[in-house]
Amino acid sequence: MTHLPVNKTTSLTVLMYHRTIIDGPIDSLTVNSRQLEEQFQFLKEEGYNCISVGEVIDHLQNGTPLKSKSLVLTSDDGYKNNYTVLYPMLKKHGLKAIIFLVPDLINMSEEEDNSEYMSLDNLRTIDSSIIEFGLHTYDHKSYNKLEPDKIEDDIIKTINWFASNKINYVPAHAYTYGEFPKGNKFKLDALFSIFYKHGIKAAFNIGNRINVLPLKSNYVIQRIDVRGTESLSQFISKVRRGKVITGFIKDILGKP
């Protein structure tokens, strides 16, 4: 299903990455440096304005206008190759991004010599004007499967982890697996109330659609997934129009 083009002056495009490698096998969650180079070059040539999630929140809270063709780059989970590949590529192209971290995976990297996730030292040496950090649950749970009290416990635990490790974060959350209780009004209202209570200003979904402004909900901001298995022309089509890729959630279910 392909959506009609939208007016880029009144929209927000959000891209979602996961693993970013120099070279090697690619899959639905993994892009290589050549692909990143081509994609970032396209975004610059097309005149997209890469903005931070902090700027999005300022827009949502204070009505500060967004630039035309606003674009947000996001990456989930906190893979070490985001530090070694994505971060230098962002600096090279003058772009910025947010990485939604899973504290339990970062903790694992502190205990394992060859962890595929970033260490606390990696996080502390990243320039916050280039990469922000956001919340992605404490240990990659699905909020669609948790009761409201457990969701609140998870958010508190995650926020406390950032505070105790002196890691700055932007008050934004990305739903693991793109799952949240959208079919249950009681649980959805409870989730949004918990976000509000704990200062979470924005939440990101996997919808493969471009967001039309003004947003209907600060807590359901759509992202377009970037897949290593797709060509540059497919990437361009998704960025320009948005596209629903059936089966993506199934592909990543159970995989951080």
Image: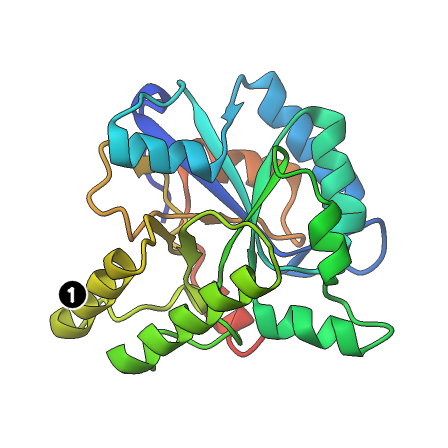
In front: 185, or 193?
193
Residue 114 against residue 165 in the figure, above or below: below
Q: Is residue 119 left or right of residue 100?
A: right
Please provide percent x and percent y for residue 212. Answer: 28, 34
Please provide percent x and percent y for residue 86. Answer: 72, 44
Residue 210 against residue 117 in the figure, above or below: above
Q: Residue at the location (43% across, 48% down)? A: 223
Q: How many marks?
A: 1
**Res 103 seen here:** yes
Q: Is residue 157 left or right of residue 202?
A: right
Please provide percent x and percent y for residue 31. Answer: 71, 51
Which residue is at the far left?
A: 186
In front: 252, or 66?
66
Q: Residue at the location (45% across, 40% down)? A: 14
Q: Quadrant of residue 120?
A: bottom right
Q: Residue at the location (20% across, 62% down)? A: 193
10 Å crowding of disc 1: few (<14), some (14-19), many (20+): some
Residue 140 against residue 87 in the figure, above or below: below
Colour scheme in the image? rainbow
Q: Residue at the location (64% across, 35% down)? A: 130
Name the kind of residue labelled 1 in the image. Answer: Asp
Please provide percent x and percent y for residue 54. Answer: 44, 37
- Quadrant where the C terminus sits is bottom right
Q: Is residue 61 left or right of residue 132?
A: left
Residue bearing mark 1? 189
**Res 6 seen here:** no
Could you tell me which secondary element the residue under label 1 belongs to? helix
In front: 238, or 207?
207
